Image: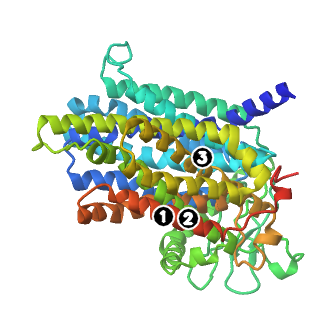
Amino acid sequence: MAPVAGRRLCWTLSLNLVAFGAHLCACGCFVYLPPLLRRAEFSEQARAAVLGLGPLLCVLGVPLVGSWSDACTSRLGRRRPFLLGIGALLALSLAGVAYGESLRNVMGANAHRAILATSTVLLDFASQALLNPCQALVCDLVPDVDFGFAVYSFALSLGGVLGYLLSGLDWTNTALGQAGQERAVFLLLLSVFTACLALNLLVAGEKPAARTDEYVVLSQANDHDVLVERPMDRLLVVGACDANGGLCLTPDVPVRKKSQESPGRHPNGLVQHLRKTHWHKMSTKDVVRTALSAALLFVCNAFCNVFITFPSWLASCLRLGVLTSVPGPLRTLFVFQLLAWMAVMSHYVYFTDFTGEVLFHGRPEQTASPADRLLYDRGVRAGSWGLLVHCVASSVYSLCFQWRLTARLGQRVGLYTAMGSFALALPGLLLFTNVGALLTLSAITGLASAALDSIPYVLACFYCANKQDYFEGAKHQPGVGQCLAVLDTAEYLAQVLLSMFMGYTIYATGTVASYVCVSTFCAVAACYACSRVACPPRTKNVGLYP
């Protein structure tokens, strides 16, 4: 049994190598990116805008990634094309930051600032957007989803540990660090991530999704949807050509009414791919005409998407139509995830500042005395060690204890344990000021990170596997990628909300210790929301899929 369990663990870890690499890059890079932006003479407002654009792009883009991956019919599978594309974007942004300084002398300071800002935004977006196809891959391929997401959480925590370690080591005395500490770290992260991406793509043996239809729905203006049959392969058609549902048709295109087909064959609103064309049987004239028709149809649909479909979608978002169309159990899980991540994210962002200013009584301002600045630096280093212990505890708990706890007692107990311990540990930071207590409490807070990186995604996968029970009567029944994207959006939205009001809260109270109160309140609210989350019976906790 031990060799079998070891092989299962190694295989599941290999499926999560991209998650490990993405979190490694995020933790390693964002130690250096704020100082690099300051060195490039970005103002405080500009730095805040650059660092805030990434989560905002994730809020808008990750749901699209989840939806497109659910409908993808690539030969590589549904998830691997997105792993490859977003991974290439992350690698490009790492290279842009690493070599941006060298371009200053060639292209000028303005070009260097533009490259640095663009690379920072893309790095922030890609390192977080990559996690959605990783989560969907675990849900697709791992039979025991509880164990799969426990290993996924372990991979994230391990990436954080190694990311902080790599960024904390001095590379200037090595051959890699001859061009500077920052370039050495970014090139090292680029090498590790590229290797992880390649291995992950090789190990993940996805099968291409079957195409269920050879027609495409072009209009939904009335009850009789019009289906257009075309001799083209992989032509993607979305939407209609005018607001009234008119069609952009070219000559000699056969049109069929949906009512003429068997019921249920063409589901409304789904983008379908067209059947393959026997190009060798077509004359040159037919090939040219088909290509021109395809180009015209593509232009028409692009025009419709930009000026009709996208504004309508944006208007529905502003009316919260997207949120209200989410099934009730998934919406409740989203609320829990939002509150819990607001608690954890505020701890991540302000913990080192808290240890330097409150626990060690230091001051970071230039007007402060050298002794006060030294105390602040000592506190920041102690806080960094606390975050490292936090990541280590999270990785050990997720791999060794959490999936066993949820298998025996259920997912709700796992969520209560994580967020309850987090809510109890944070006030202890105000009561116990020695370093030993600081590290102990930091380890306890790691349980929350382990749970949030795994248990909600397990529940989302269970909802998708049992749609007849959890999505019954819902207007929209999302796929696995979309469900996971909804939960990912909660994490990104938590970052956006914190950036909007936490700065004002700290300014109004005059102390960074106020973050402890905000974080504790959000954790308690998350515990209450957990009582409303729909969880499977205990008999179904082990092996959610047969």
Q: Residue at x 66, y 34 (%)?
A: 200
- Residue 480 in sight from this viewpoint: no
The amino acid sitting under disc 2 is Ala
Residue contact between numbered discs 2 and 3, judged by CB atoms under 8 Å: no
Q: Is residue 452 above or below residue 271?
A: above
SS at circle 3 = helix
**Alpha-carbon distance for marks 2 and 3?**
15 Å
The amino acid marked with disc number 1 is: Cys
Name the residue rendered at 86%, 57% in the picture.
Answer: 539
Residue 433: give its label.
Answer: none
What residue did someone put label 1 on? 522
On screen, residue 130 versus residue 203, left or right, reads left
Can you say whether 166 is above or below 502 in the image? above
Distance, label 3 to label 1, CA atoms, is 17 Å
Q: In the rendered image of this protein, does residue 195 appear above or below residue 318?
A: above
Residue 51 to residue 34: above or below: below
The residue indicated by pointer 2 is: 526
* SS label for mark 2: helix
Q: Is residue 533 visible to us here? A: yes
Q: Position of residue 96 (x, y in %)?
A: 37, 36
Q: Earlier in the sequence, mark 3 or mark 1?
A: 3
Q: Which of disc 3 and disc 2 is earlier in sequence?
A: 3
Snapshot quadrant of residue 272: bottom right
Tag 1 and tag 2, C-beta contact below 8 Å: yes
Q: Which residue is mark 3?
A: 450
Q: How is the image coloured?
A: rainbow
The answer to which of 168 and 361 lies nearer the viewer is: 361
Nearer to us in this view, 185 or 277: 185
